[in-house]
Amino acid sequence: MTYESDRSKSRIIWFCSRGGHIEKHVMARNSRLTALDSLRGFGILLVVLGHASRSVGLVSWIFSFHMPLFFIISGMLFHEKTIPRLV
């Protein structure tokens, strides 16, 4: 999946390859991706469960993927913006 920003029109454009062809998705900058919000909430619940659980197997399973999950989500939501120089 690739991502580009269109600053002049305040929208986000991202491309996703599915079934051998590339789909283009355009969304407003202020809109939210419900699936990513839900996935992030699920990850937070897993972290709480992992810290509260006494089962070694469950804790090992949760801790094996919960941090990469957050890195993937944050990478999908990353938007590079330029900061104006003050000097």
Image (cartoon, rainbow, N blue to C red):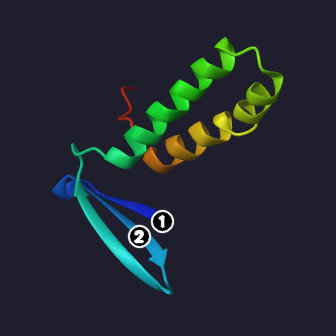
Query: In what element is the residue under mark 2?
Result: strand
Residue ranking furthest to the left: 9
Q: Amino acid at mark 2?
A: Phe
Q: Residue at x 43, y 45 (%)?
A: 77
In the displayed structure, would residue 44 be above or below residue 36?
above
Can you give x and y, in whole percent of width and height, for residue 7 in the image? Answer: 25, 54
Q: Residue at x 38, y 48 (%)?
A: 35
In the displayed structure, would residue 66 be above or below residue 12?
above
Q: Which residue is mark 1?
A: 2
Frontmost residue, 36 versus 26 = 36
Looking at the rendered image, the quarter that the C terminus falls into is: top left
Residue ranking furthest to the front: 55
Q: Is 63 positioned to the left or the right of 44 in the image?
A: right
Q: Which disc is residue 54 wearing?
A: none
Can you give x and y, in whole percent of width and height, for residue 43 in the image? Answer: 54, 33
Q: Amino acid at mark 1?
A: Thr
- Of label 2 and label 1, which has the lower sequence position? 1
Q: How many marks?
A: 2
Q: Are marks 2 and 1 in contact (CB under 8 Å)?
A: yes
Q: Residue at x 37, y 77 (%)?
A: 23
Frontmost residue, 12 versus 7 = 12
In the displayed structure, would residue 50 be above or below residue 28?
above
Q: Within 10 angstroms of label 2, few (less than 14), some, or many (20 or more) residues?
A: some
Can you give x and y, in whole percent of width and height, for residue 32 in the image? Answer: 28, 44
Q: Which disc is residue 15 wearing?
A: 2
Query: In what element is the residue under mark 1?
Result: strand
